[in-house]
Amino acid sequence: MAIRTKLNDLLGIEHPVLLAPMAGVSGGALAAAVTQAGGLGQIGGGYGDADWLGREFAAAGNARLGVGFITWKLAQQPHLLDMVLERQPVAVFLSFGDAGSFAETIRRSGSKLIMQVQTLEQARAAIDAGADAIVAQGTEAGGHGGSRATLPLVPAVVDIAGELPVIAAGGIADGRGMAAALMLGAAGVLCGTAFFASDEALSPEGAKAVATAASGDHTLRSSVCDVARGLDWPGAWNLRTLRNHFSDRWAGEVESLKADAAAQRDIYASAAAKGDFDTAAVIVGEGVDLVTRREPAAAILTRMVTEAEALLKAAPGYVAAPA
Amino acid sequence: MAIRTKLNDLLGIEHPVLLAPMAGVSGGALAAAVTQAGGLGQIGGGYGDADWLGREFAAAGNARLGVGFITWKLAQQPHLLDMVLERQPVAVFLSFGDAGSFAETIRRSGSKLIMQVQTLEQARAAIDAGADAIVAQGTEAGGHGGSRATLPLVPAVVDIAGELPVIAAGGIADGRGMAAALMLGAAGVLCGTAFFASDEALSPEGAKAVATAASGDHTLRSSVCDVARGLDWPGAWNLRTLRNHFSDRWAGEVESLKADAAAQRDIYASAAAKGDFDTAAVIVGEGVDLVTRREPAAAILTRMVTEAEALLKAAPGYVAAPA
């Protein structure tokens, strides 16, 4: 069976499940595996590395793909968009910043324009920019995001989106979350954390092990990891990660961390290189409670869809004649 | 028609919808109206005022009711529990603190014990304390709460709750949210913001007007309002309100606010008395996008249930043979 919404036709997919284009995690192999299983894999363009992008597109073979960019970073190296559009991706996904002329360039290329937003105000801007679909991302998502939560944000975005498909993101890691998203009015889901520990993800093996054992009680949003990586994120966005020794030390003292940034960047980079996750961040969201084992991406997607199908088919059972 | 889950039998209700026992807002008239419409109304015991409680129980007439307490505050005036149990409420709802001996007292009284939690760790403690139902409350809720979000918290709590009913709270203000909660595995929903602007709510008229016009983009969690009200909240809990001039001034400077607390408490109290909501807080959550008019509580509940029924009955339509 399949789950069908208007998103299936827009993107030419069997199930309305998109891989979040996680920077450094969603490479070609993972994206291809998600597409192969009936969803839409998306390569994470991240902070922009043409060689990395070329390699990961190659690793995906001829799988149908999307590719995601951090909008404010893409604006510093717009040639990467041209490079990617030559490969004719199904969709280009933009998040975190003003799309400016990218929106028009992408739509004219024939790729679909998917814009991720964290507020209702940003959703209005995405509609005005001509997005083909809008991702409403809640604060419970891993990685960068905002402060609004998925459950109330999605229906509010749906109410202003008219016929545009809205995709729910943030906290969705199984079939229950997927079925819930459809009830909220979403036409599909975008999942990152659910695939973080998959076989094909480029996440370090040690980080996968930490993630599968972790509780969603132990994540936080902060700028600590960005400062420690020397990333100068604008606006109100920050990063959800698992808490660790380093974030506990600095989360309440980001200004002090900035003052000592040069030394702390060395410490952080060295820890990341060694796979020391007491210092380096494991970048997952609150859905990590539902991620309990390392397994192939196809198994994750198939289980999610199968569970959602069962819940949706049984849903009328909640409705009964009054007692 | 009705929506039925195991919560209906536990509480003797027609629809699994509970009124959040909002301090100073959920009085007897609102609680009775929610019960009358098929849910379970709950009076907000708040910070503990025996006269107020007696008056609001009287205002509810002989409606079946729950009553909610702030656990750490109840511990300072435990006689209020005895006073309430004499009225044989359907349920006593505890949130924010260690239930201690209250759990046993409530269960022995014949009232059901509903315990609200904000983390998975607290959910384990509530199960151990012998709760009859657990409310998993997400950070998007108005009023006091924690940092985890509803959508990923609910299924994680369901996974450890066994046969205990889990009630979803935070961000649920229409039938979409209710249907989504059921898909997440919840046996019902608890709603506060949805009823904040209802005719029967004790919220000031001016606050109702502000709430119906507000966007969920403009809420925040902070301790500002508690400090300004002289409330010494323990632990990691703080308050979600609409942002206003006062919260914008102080949210980044809570320590400075504490240093000037005496003067600021006067300013705040005076504003609250006058209905000046540039200074006094309107205590609602992110679901406020979906609250667009002042109307009877019964209309809100009936629309929520009717919408959820339609969504649940149509849910199998998402499942199709592969294209």
Image: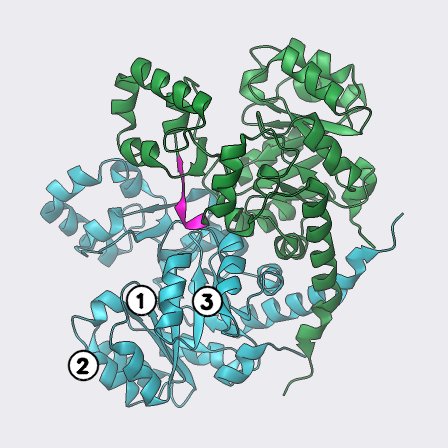
Chain colours: A green, B cyan
Q: In the image, residue A87 lies at what x, y percent?
A: 78, 17
Q: Is residue A304 magenta?
A: no
Mark 2 and mark 1 in contact? Answer it, CB < 8 Å. Answer: no
Discs 2 and 1 carry the same chain letter: yes
Residue at x 40%, y 63% (from the top left corner): B123
Q: Report the Cα–Cα distance between label 1 and label 3.
A: 15 Å
For marks 2 and 1 on the same chain, the one whose residue lies earlier in the sequence: 1
| Left or right: where B253 falls relative to B199 | left
For marks 2 and 3 on the same chain, the one whose residue lies earlier in the sequence: 2
Q: In the image, residue B313 lies at what x, y percent?
A: 74, 68
Camera-side residue of A135 and B157: B157
Residue at x 80%, y 57% (from the top left corner): B319
Which chain's residue wears label 3?
A: B
- Please give the residue where the numbered disc 1 appears in the rendered image: B23
Q: Is residue A220 magenta?
A: yes
Residue B187, quarter of picture: bottom right
Q: Which-is-in-front pick, marks 1 and 3? A: 1
Q: Is residue B174 above or below residue A214?
A: below
- Please give the residue where the numbered disc 2 appears in the rendered image: B79
Q: Report the Cα–Cα distance between label 2 and label 1.
A: 18 Å
Which chain's residue wears label 2?
A: B
Q: In the image, residue A124 lies at what x, y percent?
A: 60, 35
What amino acid is labelled 3 in the image? Ser
CA neighbours of label 3 inside 10 A, class few (<14), some (14 to 19), many (20+): many
Q: Is residue B119 visible?
A: yes
Mark 1 and mark 3 in contact? Answer it, CB < 8 Å. Answer: no
What amino acid is labelled 2 in the image? His
What amino acid is labelled 1 in the image? Ala
For marks 1 and 3 on the same chain, the one whose residue lies earlier in the sequence: 1
| Left or right: where B25 falls relative to A209 | left
- Please give the residue where the numbered disc 3 appears in the rendered image: B198
